[in-house]
Image (cartoon, grey):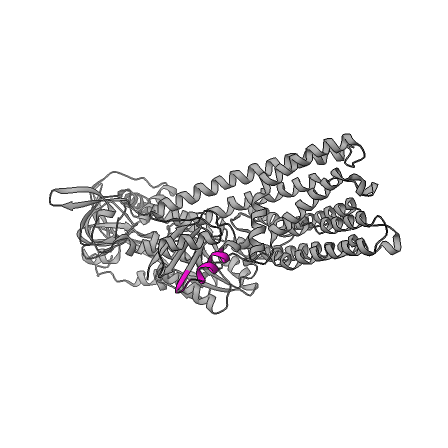
Amino acid sequence: MAQIRLYVPNMHCAGCVAKIEKAFAAQQAVEALVNLADKQVTVNGNITLDACLAVLASVGFTAQPIVDAKAAAENKRLDDATEYRLRLKQAIAALSLGSLMMLWGLFGGEMMIHTPELQLGWGIMGLVTLGLLVATGGHFYQGMWRALQAKTSNMDTLIVLGTSTAWLYSMGVLIFPSAFPMDTRHVYFEASAMILGLINLGHALELKARGKTSDAVQRLLGLQSTTAIRIGELGDENVDISLLNVGDRLRLRPGDRVALDGVVVEGQSSLDESMLTGEPMPVSKRPGDPLSAGTVNGNGSVIYRVTAMFADTRLANIIALVQQAQTSKLPIGRLADKIAAVFVPSVMLIALLAAAIWYFFGPEPALSHGLVVLTSVLIIACPCALGLATPMSIMVALGRAAQMGVLVKQGEALQTASRVNCVVLDKTGTVTLGKPQVTDIVWSPMIAADEQLSLLGAIASLEQHSEHPLANAIVQYAKVHAAPMPCTANFINYQGKGIAGQVGPDSLLVGNFALMQAFKVVSHTGEMIDSTDAAEFAQQAKTPIYVAKAGQLVATMALADPIKPDAKAAIAALQQRGIRLLLLTGDNPITAQAVAATVGITEVIAGVLPEQKQQHIQQLQQQGYCVAMVGDGINDAPALMSADVGIAMASGTEVAIESAQMTLLSQQLMIIPQLLALSSAAMTNIKQNLFGAFIYNSLGIPVAAGVLYPLTGMLLSPVLAAAAMALSSLTVVTNANRLRSQRL
C-alpha cells in the first residue's frame, strides 16, 4: 500500500481537518491521517501524488509533497511565523482605527447623521472601514464561505455577521438618512473595526502558542546525525548517512552521536542512552552489544556495524510514534462553535421574520421600522460576548497558571485537564531530582575517624578523572565537606565496573561489587566481601559503591537520586481528588518500587521502553481514563503526545517539553494538583460565561424585535442594542477575572 506525505500550509482548524478527511474518504480504498500540528496529511492507499493534490485542490487546499522531513518542519515554522506577523499587523491596524473612532464618540464627537457635512466625513470613514474589512477580515469571510459550503456555521459566521451588519447599517444611514427615524441615524463603523482587531489579536497569540507543538518532532529530527565515519578499503571517510548501507563498519569517536542502529564489533565505551531510557547513568558497551541511533558516546572509541537504515531505527520509531499521536489527537470542538451552529441561523431567521412582520403589519414608516428591527436584532446578537466567553477565561487561567509556574501551550489542554482522573508519573527527574547524590558512607572499623576526611578526598581525587555521573556526585560531596584532594597517578578505567589509581602512597580501587570480586577484595576480618550491603541499599533505591585500599574494603558509599521534597504531599493531594496514580519508568523494578513506596504510589510499571510507555497510556485510555502523563525525558515524548494531557518538567529534555501541552517551570510536584483544580475552575467559568452571553442575547433579541412596543410605544434603538452587547461583554470579562483570585 502506497504512502504519500503532504504539507498543507493553508490548513488552520478542526474544520479544515474534517473537510480534508471527508474528501479522501470519498475515494475508494484511501485513508487520510491529518496532523494539524505539523500541517501534514499522510495518505495511505492506492492513489497517486497527482490524484492527492487534485483531491485537496477540490476542497480549496494547496499542498506539496514532503521529501525531506527536516525541510518540511522548517517550512512549517516559517509559514507560522509569517502568519503570526500578518495577524498581529491586522490586529494593530483594526484596533488603531476602531480606537480613534471610539475616542471621537466618547469625547463628544458627533456619530449621528444630521447634516451633509457629517455624511461626507463619515462616508470617508465608511470607505476606510470597508478597506479594513477586506484587509483584516478577509480570512473570516473565507472561513464563513467554507462553512456555508459544508452547510454549517461557525465562529467565522458570527464574526462576519457582526462586522457586516454594523457596516451595512451605517452605510444605509449615510446614503439614505431620510429613510431612518431621526434617533436611529447612528453609525457603527467602530464596532466593525474593534471586533476584527480583538479577534485577530487573539488568533495571533493562539498561533504563537500552538505553533510550538510541532517543535517536538523538529527536536527529535535534530538528534539524527547527518554524517558518519565509514571504514572503507582506503581508510576512514566522512560520508552522508544516506550513502550508508546495512553491514557498513562505522567508527564512533568520543563525544560523537551514533548515526544508525548497529552492533559493536571492536572497542569499549560508555554511551548516554537517556534519550531512550530516561536514566542518566551511561551504559557500558563492548563487542556484541547493540547501539541505537541518536545516543551519545562517552570517552571511549568503538567500531560498529550498521544493522538498520534510518527509517528502521529506534529513533525513527520514536519520531513516528510522536507524529502518529499528533495525528490521532483531534482538537477539542469549541463549545461556542456548537452553540453558533444553532444560534446563528436562529438569529438570522428571527431578524428576518421580525422585520417582515414590521414591514407588512407595523405602523408607518414601516420600512424604516423594519430596518431598525432587523439591525437591532443582529447587533444585539453580535458575537462579542459569545466569542469572548471562552478565550477570556482561558487567558486569565493561563496567566494564573504562569504565576503558579506552569507554561500552558494550548488553551484546549485546560479543558481536557479538567476531566483527568488518572495521572501517570515518570520516575527519574519527575518524582526524583534526576541528580545522584551521596546519601551514606559506611566506614570500615580499620579507618579511624581522623582518617575519614582525608580518605574521602583521595576517593574524590580519583573520581575526578571519571566521566560517570556517580563520580561527579562523589566529587561534589567531597567539596561540600571540604575534603583535601591530592594528586593522582596511574588512573585506570574499568568499563562498566569502576576505576583504580594511585593517590599518594595508597593504591585505591573504587567501583561496584563485580569489580571487588574481580580483585578478590576482603573485609577487615580477612573474609571475602558479600553483596548484603548491595541488596539492602537496592531496597532503599540506592546504588552502592565500594572502596578498597591495598586489597581491603575501607568504605561503602551509597548514592541515590533523591526524591523531591514535596513529592509525597503532591501524591496525597492527587489521591484526595480521587485520581488514580501510576509510576511508569524505564528503571529497574526494585528501585522503582522503593521510590513508589516512599511517596505513597501503589501501582508501578518498571523496565519499559518508550513505545511500551505509550502503549500503557493507550491501554489506560481504552479503559475509559482521561490520562495526564508527567515526564522529562526524550523517552517520554511518545507517551506525552499520546496522553490526553502531557505535562513536562522544565528541567527535562527539550523534546519532552515540546511534546507536552504543559510545562512545569519549577521542580515542585505540588503544582500538578493545583493545576488540575485550576482547569476545573476555568471550565466552570467558561460555562458560566457562555450561559450568561447566551441569556443576554436570548433576552435581548425579543426586545430588539419589538415585543415591548405595544406596552412602551418604542422600539429598541440600535444604540441601546450595542450598549446591551457591550454590557454582556463586560459581564463576561468581569466573571473571567474572578479566576485570578479563586482559591485552588
Q: Quadrant for residue 286, please give it.
A: bottom left
Q: Nearer the viewer, residue 458 or 335?
A: 335
**Percent of width and height locating residue 562:** 42, 53
Instruction: Determine if the magenta segment contains residue 20.
Output: yes
**Percent of width and height locating residue 470:** 32, 49
Q: Nearer the viewer, residue 204 or 284?
A: 204
Magenta extent: 17-31
Q: Relative to 458, is 42 above or below?
A: below
Quadrant where the image shows the N terminus: bottom left
- Left or right: 379 in relation to 584: right
Q: Relative to 117, is 322 above or below?
A: below
Q: Nearer the viewer, residue 218 or 384?
A: 384
**Percent of width and height locating residue 743:** 64, 53
- Left or right: 60 in relation to 309: right
Instruction: Determine if the magenta segment contains residue 607.
Output: no
How would you classify the magenta stretch by its main secondary structure?
A: helix
